[in-house]
Amino acid sequence: MSLLGIKIIFVANNHKCCSTINKYFNNVHDVKVIRCTISQLKPVDCIVCPGDSYATMENGINRTINTMLNIKSDIQCYINDTYYGEQPVGTTTILNVNNDDYKYIAYVPIMRYNVNMNMTHNIYTAFRSLLVAVMEHNKHNNNNIRTVLCPVFGIDDDMDLEEAVHQMSTAYGILSMNLNCNKKNKELINKYLII
């Protein structure tokens, strides 16, 4: 697996968020952070919408994205058809969007329902699933996703900013190393994820 060719563009609406992303993704060639709102950056291939397992899209960034794209009912229909009404954390749905600014939306549950995610690995699991889904999409489709517009997961839901970005950078770094599934690598990953 390679993340080469996939550019992650993080949006951050304040200086603290920008500097935290830069701290954890320092010198990562295909990761960029821009201080703005998610609606200000376009066009990109894929816009990422973190939310809950039911795509309620009632607050924060997911409500903004739904206002921009009116995509909630499409995501909920997909969840009903594919996951029988509840999309698990650790999965990502990539849907076509009929929009001049975005080809795809990636819907990523970061929690089952609105609960405190501190002291969990939900952000790691969710961001890893996003990266894997984009790589798998690119393996099986001619219309590749090259640019991914992404907010920091969980901070609209009271997740600690530092911990959220740490978990996202750990997912990116571990996936970039292309580790095989074995006990040694499980221990390595767990070492990086200590909360």
Image: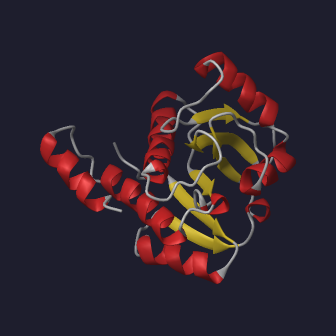
Counting every numbered tag in the picture gives 0
Q: Quadrant of the C terminus?
A: bottom left
Query: Quick check: 56 above or below 141?
Result: below
On the image, the x and y values in percent for residue 109 come to 59, 41
**Along the viewing direction, whichever of 26 and 158 lies nearer the viewer:** 158
* Residue 133 spot, x, y in % from top left: 49, 37
Q: Which of 65 and 191 is in front in this view?
A: 191
Q: Which residue occupies the foreground of this view, 41 or 36?
A: 36
In the image, taking residue 188 as reference, residue 6 lies left or right, namely right
Q: Which of 159 and 11 is in front in this view?
A: 159
The residue positioned 31% from the left and 54% from the top of the image is 174
Q: Is residue 33 left or right of residue 2?
A: right
Q: Which color scheme did the rendering employ for the protein?
A: secondary structure
In the rendered image, the vertical position of residue 57 relative to residue 30, given as above or below: above
Horizontal side of 119 relative to 67 (left or right) equals left
Quadrant, the N terminus: top left
Q: Which residue is drawn at 37% across and 59% down?
A: 170
Residue 115 locus on image (x, y percent): 60, 49
Residue drawn 21% across the image and 40% down it: 180
Q: Residue at x 27, y 47 (%)?
A: 178
Residue 63, x across and y down, in percent: 79, 50
Q: Residue furthest left?
A: 184
Please identify the quarter of the rendering in which residue 193 is found: bottom left
| Residue 70 in the figure: left or right of residue 17 | right
